[in-house]
Every structure is written in C-alpha cells, then in structure tokens.
Image: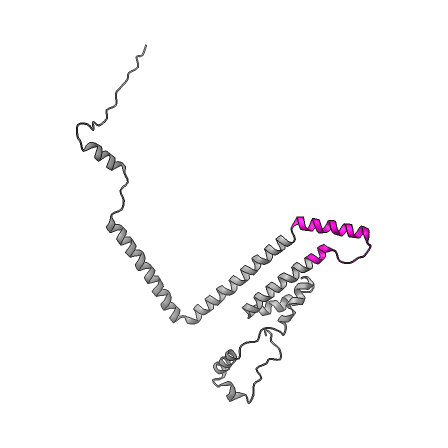
Amino acid sequence: MRVPTICRASLPRTGSNPFDSARFSSAAKPRSPAPKSRKKLRQTISLTVVAFAASATALGFVYTDEVEWGASATVRGGRIIAASLHIALDYKWSLRKSVLEKLKALDDADRKDDDDDDDGRIEKLWSEVHRRNAERLLHVFMENGGVYIKLGQHLNALVYLLPVEYTSTFRVCQDSCSPTPLKELQELIKVETGKEMNEIFEEFDETPIGVASL
C-alpha cells in the first residue's frame, strides 16, 4: 500500500525582512515609461508632423497644376459617389415592398370599379423616382463639367436602354450646358495665341448661342 506524501512548499518569508513585502509588491506592478522616453516620443511625433506638413506645402508650390488637378478630381469623384449612394437609397426606400404592395392593392380595387386603362399608381411612382434621380444626376454632371457633360450626351442618346425620364432630362447636355466664364475664355485665347481677345476680335458677344461639350 502506497502512502501519500504531503510536501510543504517553501515560501519566502517576508516577516524576517521588512523590505521584502515592498520589494515583491513593487515588482508585481508594471513599470511606466520613464518621463524622458515620453518626452522623446512626443518630440519625434511633433517633428514628423512638421516635416510632413512642410513637404506637402513645398510640393504644393512646385507642382501647383498637379495639386489643383488632384483636388478637383477628388471633389468630382466625391460628388459622383455621394449622388450614387443617394440615388440607390432613394430607389430602395421609395420602391420598397410594402409601398408597392399597397399601391397594387389600390390599383386592383380601381380596376374592379372602372375599366379605364390609365397608368397605375406603381407606374407613376416609378416615373417620379426616375425623374427625380435623373435630375439629381444631371445636377452633378453640370457641376463637374468637362467629360461629364459628354457622358450626359451619351446617356441622352440611349433611348433604347434608359427610361424616357433619363433621356429627356439629359437632353440639355446637347446644347444648354452652363457657359464657360468669359474670364477663362480670355485666358485661354491669350495662352493659345499670345494676344488679348480685343486684339483679335472687333467685338465679342458674351451670350453664347449654345453650350455643349465638343
């Protein structure tokens, strides 16, 4: 028969030395970084931020055109993304299942009472949503200008693919766009010809006959 053996674990005797308890308690606590280390870290971060800001400012002066183009592209892209999200949410919310089911029930009730073949409420709702979002997209195209006007012209031509609300809304992109400011035209003529506008033309009508993307 095996007799179990009980051993007594040896523990440090803290009573013999009054500093033992303080030593063990201080060793259990995590040490905080030294004040000098924190100060150096703050200085490093501050110098990094200052260096980055100075570099960005210098590049902005050296590559002015590139910076302006990048900022303009970012703003234009942001408008398109915001409008796309807005349009998607509008379709999702305005044409949700509960609304369509309610309108369908009303249309069915009307058909029982009247044999009129007018467009139903669902078709009218679709048309309203199409028109509203086409105008929203057109507004973004007009603000962005440039190639977006050309895109609007192409959308106007897609009568075989897009709803009529879109093609009719984008018709203004053909010849009724926002005119280029006269000051920009004067600067462009001077850059291209080296002469002022009044040196080339005897008179210049500021009201355009039509405005479109060529």
Residue drawn at (53%, 77%) of the image: 181
Residue 175, percent from left and from top: 63, 74
Identify the residue at the far left of this view: 17
Is 213 left, or right, of 105 in this rendering? left
Report the predominant secondary structure element of the magenta stretch: helix
Q: How is the image coloured?
A: one colour
Q: Is residue 176 magenta?
A: no
Residue drawn at (60%, 58%) of the image: 87
Is 114 left, or right, of 95 in this rendering? right
Residue 83, percent from left and from top: 56, 60
Residue drawn at (51%, 87%) of the image: 198
Front residue of this view, candidates 90 and 11: 90
Q: Is residue 104 magenta?
A: yes
Vertical comparison of 172 with 187: above or below: above
Picture quadrant of residue 46: bottom left
Total numbered labels? 0
Please identify the quadrant where the C terminus is shown.
bottom right
Residue drawn at (37%, 67%) of the image: 57
Residue bounds of the magenta highlight: 96-125
Residue 127, percent from left and from top: 69, 60
Residue 179, percent from left and from top: 57, 76
Front residue of this view, candidates 90 and 9: 90
Vertical comparison of 28 with 168: above or below: above
Please identify the quadrant where the N terminus is shown.
top left
Is 31 left, or right, of 67 in this rendering? left
